[in-house]
Image (spheres, rainbow, N blue to C red):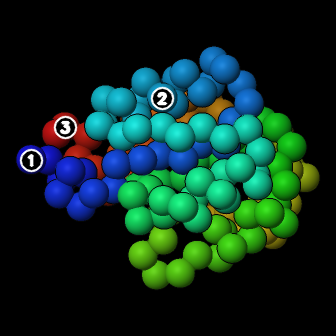
Amino acid sequence: MNDQAANSKTRLLLLNRDLMAGIAVTNAAKTLDLRVDRATSASELVERWSSAKEQVAVVVLDLNMPVEWDDLAEMLTGAEGDPPVIGFGPHVDVEGRRAAKQAGLKRIYSNGDFHRQMGEIIARYAGIDPQH
């Protein structure tokens, strides 16, 4: 039994509207034995997080789209044991990154870095050995 199965954190929550990026994240997550629950709005993501937070290993936010930060406040201020939340987006979107940081998002990757290292990044934040 791998570490992921042992701690029952089997899901990755994804806020994303771009089909190609969503497929890439899904494929990377599958190699880590994570099931992706994709939401297209912040309110939908929070609903899924609230109903299954104990099963969620990591939350990934696609910042290449408008994000309703107020809806994500509880998720971003998280309590001890809540899943980590990371984001990826354009490195040139200074205002978008500033809004994300002000909302409480602690880790934002550029699109290039995230897509180049996606499996490693997801594994690190989900607490999974990528070589499992």
> Which residue is rendered at x = 67% and y = 20% of the image?
19
Toward the right, the furthest residue is 95
Query: Where is 19 relative to 132, above or below?
Result: above
> Which quadrant holds residue 46?
bottom right
Residue situated in front as seen by the camera: 88 or 37: 37
Residue lying at the far front in this picture: please name it: 51
Name which of mark 1 and mark 2 comes first in the sequence.
1
Residue located 59% across and 42% down the image: 14
Helix, strand, or loop for circle 3?
A: loop
Circle 1 is placed at which residue position?
1
- Please state which of residues 48 and 14 is positioned toward the viewer in this rendering: 48
Q: Where residue 83 sits: x, y (%)? A: 47, 64
Say which mark, if any, is on residue 131: 3
What SS does tag 1 mark?
loop
Q: Is residue 98 left or right of residue 111?
A: right
- Tell me residue 32's x, y (percent): 30, 37
- Left or right position of 85 against 99: left
- Classify 10 Å Cα crowding around label 3: few (below 14), some (14-19), many (20 and above): few
The residue singled out by tag 2 in the image is 26
Calculate the distance from the C-alpha at mark 3 to the C-alpha at mark 1.
Answer: 14 Å
**Residue 54 in the image: x percent, y percent?**
41, 65
Cα separation between marks 2 and 3: 18 Å
